[in-house]
Image (cartoon, rainbow, N blue to C red):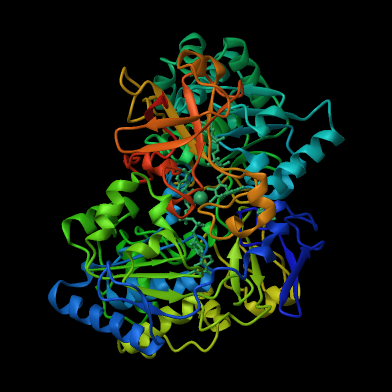
């Protein structure tokens, strides 16, 4: 499976000499052989700049020196034991990643939440999927996405909201366009995005809303449905709860007011609503434009409200479909890879769930902490206050990807002991590490990942890890054994880890207890729930219209629109939004090593509307200064009418290894959604200045 985005394309990989070769897997149901530019160039990213040996240093200003695994792991184990004795488990913390394989995630979870007794294991999914998780849970009772890729060829109306699908989930977008080409009269695409992205350019309708106004937009659409009689009365009556309360909220969202808040025309709002409500199947696809917001959960729930109201759910070609970002963001949810979760879609806040996992892991009753662990942003606060004595970072590069870079830098500098476990060196986050552990990456280990449509694929090893690199799960397991938990971490391969993990999913929404490495190898990738050893998994959830809530009904929850946390003002008059480019992956540790992709996107830029630029006397290509209350960037302006006036956009891929002043996250702030604790990476106030 491709180790980049959550589309989860299948690959055929083999070794030729010392090179790995790949092609698209024609039999894989996610991509049927197709790959995008990132997937195709994957082999070019595997060799250069690898971290080959463990390295250590006494303090952050000393140079790294090569060390042995034994010495590095002894230091970590000793430090954990001392911390447990003096400060207790809450002073230990792991920050992981949706790019772990499921087996890596599971062993990490077992070590921290089980054996060590702290829920301080969060992951970069906090910056990515946590609003979708909370929104799904509150509305539908569980965060399993109900849809399938099959729906991409059955829907009539596509609402692409806060998703640049063409650049970020390209193979999904290809499938949608192919479907539209087959049914040009029926199939319609609506894109809601402050930028007229490649996705919007290929859509039938672009709703160029102001950043952060999605709740108003979706409430406006719901209100039009009420007025026009486009409500599926029977579905609402039989399968939902909270309709009257929702109607009260919707009263304030007249089309005129909504058009004003969003900065669009009433006719556009009406057209979008009609296409959505009156189609034979409406599928909404969303990602970071909804999730990365102080209203992230409100946006997700408002979107789900619209599906429930119109009955556009629980049947083929319809439903609210969250596109997962990272290849194994979904697997992370299955194993409890956020500070509030436990394996098998369980919660650390539920006594019953904790008891199950304590018994399963053969721990004493009460061994799992009752409190939610620290979220990504709270980890930074914990570093500032000195409450965290061990920070272990694996498969994520927070020195580039977390908001408010300067604050993070100061916090990370204060660490007593930071371990960074990554495949590459140099790396921005390594600047803050005392110990570097070399990780085996894609192609060098065997394990599973789950894509956006809940499909589990097995990725097999094609070559040996370079140098002394080891698999992530094996590193966590060895630390577990060194701490004295021999039985718990006595796995001899990742198939055994997977076999143990799947038993935690039995009778759960994500039931995959019949899956094993052998079955996945023999029968190919499977969707969960997959409850029968001889039958394939289910393509859709809730087709019986019974939702996993206490009374089986889906829940309407109406939200008032609120603007982003930091509003433009006289000093910082523009709203900056941030995101991705087609050819690059996150912090460039891999795609930055591929010449073809570097040529495609040579550097960062600030997209701005010519009218905004004219006022500041800025020309296309001119290097400019961008300031926020927290930091600055110095990058070329890229003038385009494909963005709203008042809004500017910057890709977030470039970190300090590529030069000074190139990072979007020097500008962003750390305010989060109150429920999901996901940061608002999509809106902050900035000022642009001409350099004289
Ligand atoms: N090429 C590429 N593909 C990737 C990745 C990558 O790094 N590169 N990363 C993967 C990961 S982890 C993720 S999470 C996904 C992310 O996938 P996407 O969410 O599609 O990508 P982004 O560019 O972060 O943001 C999407 C869009 O949200 C818009 N937006 C900003 N503010 C708002 C708003 O308030 N409302 C609405 N409606 N839209 C808004 C932005 O203008 C942007 O076009 O991509 C995955 N795929
Ligand atoms: N401003 C702004 N900031 C954002 C976003 C945004 O839209 N705007 N998006 C956010 C989102 S959605 C995400 S998902 C994050 C992503 O942010 P990060 O997680 O920081 O990004 P990556 O560059 O993918 O980092 C993954 C790291 O894991 C390493 N690695 C690869 N394979 C392996 C492996 O098998 N094992 C180990 N141990 N390491 C491995 C890579 O070398 C790399 O250093 O960024 C977030 N930050
Ligand atoms: S669409 Fe995503 S999973 Fe497929 S090849 Fe491209 S990056 Fe890989
Ligand atoms: Mo993400």
Q: To which quarter of the image does residue 76 belong?
A: bottom left
- Placement of 263 over or under 108, stated as above or below: above
Judge by depth and name the residue closer to the eye, 464 or 216: 464
Counting from the top left corner in percent of width and height, residue 369 is at 26, 67
- Residue at 15% x, 79% y is 85
**Farthest-out residue, top:** 256
Counting from the top left corner in percent of width and height, residue 324 is at 56, 50
- Residue at 23% x, 52% y is 381
Q: Would residue 479 be found to the left or right of residue 518 on screen?
A: left
User: Split into 4 quadrants, where in the image is the C terminus?
Assistant: top left
- Placement of 518 over or under 376, stated as above or below: below
- Placement of 655 over or under 553, stated as above or below: below
Q: To which quarter of the image does residue 122 belong?
A: bottom left
Counting from the top left corner in percent of width and height, residue 616 is at 45, 17
- Residue at 54% x, 77% y is 498
- Placement of 12 over or under 67, stated as above or below: above
Judge by depth and name the residue closer to the eye, 406 or 82: 406
- Residue 488 seen in the figure: no
Judge by depth and name the residue closer to the eye, 48 or 525: 48
User: Split into 4 quadrants, where in the image is the N terminus?
Assistant: bottom right
- Residue at 23% x, 58% y is 383
């Amino acid at each position: 499976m491709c180790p980049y985005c959550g589309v989860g394309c299948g690959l055929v990989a083999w070794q030729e000499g010392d090179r790995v070769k790949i092609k698209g897997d024609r039999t894989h149901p996610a991509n049927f052989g197709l790959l995008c530019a990132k997937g195709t160039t994957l082999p070019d990213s595997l060799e250069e700049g690898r971290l080959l040996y463990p390295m250590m240093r006494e303090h952050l200003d000393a140079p790294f020196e090569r060390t042995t695994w034994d010495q590095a792991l002894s230091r970590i184990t000793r430090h954990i034991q001392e911390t447990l004795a003096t400060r207790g488990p809450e002073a230990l913390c792991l920050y992981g990643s949706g790019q772990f394989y499921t087996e890596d995630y599971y062993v990490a979870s077992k070590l921290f939440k089980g054996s060590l007794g702290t829920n301080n294991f969060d992951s970069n999914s906090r910056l990515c999927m946590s609003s979708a998780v909370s929104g799904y849970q509150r509305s539908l009772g569980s965060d399993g996405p109900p849809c399938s890729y099959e729906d991409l060829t059955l829907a009539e109306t596509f609402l692409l909201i806060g998703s640049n699908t063409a650049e970020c989930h390209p193979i999904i977008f290809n499938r949608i366009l192919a479907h539209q080409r087959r049914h040009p009269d029926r199939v319609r695409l609506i894109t809601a995005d402050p930028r007229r992205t490649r996705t919007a350019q290929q859509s039938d309708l672009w709703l160029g809303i102001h950043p952060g106004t999605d709740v108003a937009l979706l409430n406006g659409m719901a209100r039009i449905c009420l007025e026009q009689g486009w409500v599926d009365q029977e579905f609402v009556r039989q399968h939902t709860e909270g309709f009257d309360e929702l109607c009260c909220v919707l009263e304030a969202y007249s089309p005129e007011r909504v058009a004003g808040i969003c900065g669009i025309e009433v006719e556009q709002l009406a057209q979008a609503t009609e296409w959505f409500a009156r189609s034979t199947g409406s599928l909404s696809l969303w990602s970071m434009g909804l999730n990365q917001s102080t209203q992230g959960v409100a946006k997700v729930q408002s979107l789900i409200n619209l599906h429930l109201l119109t009955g556009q759910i629980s049947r083929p070609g319809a439903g609210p479909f969250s596109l997962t970002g990272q290849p194994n963001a979904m697997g992370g949810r299955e194993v409890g890879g956020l500070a509030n979760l436990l394996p098998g879609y369980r919660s650390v806040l539920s006594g019953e769930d904790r008891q199950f996992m304590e018994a399963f892991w053969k721990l004493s009753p009460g061994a799992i902490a009752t409190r939610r662990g620290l979220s990504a942003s709270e980890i930074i606060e914990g570093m500032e206050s000195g409450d965290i004595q061990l920070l272990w970072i694996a498969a994520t590069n927070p020195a580039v990807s977390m908001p408010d870079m300067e604050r993070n830098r100061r916090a990370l500098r204060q660490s007593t002991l930071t371990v960074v476990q990554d495949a590459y060196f140099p790396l921005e986050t390594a600047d803050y590490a005392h110990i570097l552990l070399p990780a085996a990456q894609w192609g060098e280990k065997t394990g599973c990942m789950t894509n956006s449509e809940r499909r589990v694929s097995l990725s097999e090893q094609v070559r040996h890890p370079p140098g002394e690199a080891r698999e992530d799960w094996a590193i966590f397991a060895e630390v577990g054994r060194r701490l004295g938990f021999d039985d718990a971490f006595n796995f001899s391969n990742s198939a055994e880890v997977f076999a143990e993990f799947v038993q935690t999913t039995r009778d759960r929404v994500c039931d995959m207890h019949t899956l094993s490495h052998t079955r996945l190898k023999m029968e190919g990738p499977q969707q969960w729930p997959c409850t029968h050893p001889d039958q394939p998994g289910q393509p859709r959830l809730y087709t019986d219209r019974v939702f996993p809530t206490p009374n089986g009904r889906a829940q309407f929850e109406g939200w008032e629109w609120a603007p982003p946390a930091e509003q433009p003002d006289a000093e910082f008059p523009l709203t900056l939004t941030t995101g991705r480019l087609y050819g690059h992956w996150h912090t460039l540790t891999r795609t930055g090593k591929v010449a073809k992709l570097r040529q495609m996107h040579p550097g960062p830029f600030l997209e701005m509307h010519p009218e905004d630029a004219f006022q500041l006397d800025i020309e296309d290509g001119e290097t400019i200064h961008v300031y926020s209350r927290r930091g600055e960037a110095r990058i070329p302006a890229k003038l385009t009418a494909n963005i709203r006036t008042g809004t500017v956009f910057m890709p977030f891929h470039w970190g300090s290894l590529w030069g000074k002043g190139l990072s979007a996250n020097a500008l962003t702030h750390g305010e989060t959604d109150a429920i999901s604790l996901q940061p608002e990476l999509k809106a902050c106030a900035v000022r642009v200045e001409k350099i004289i």
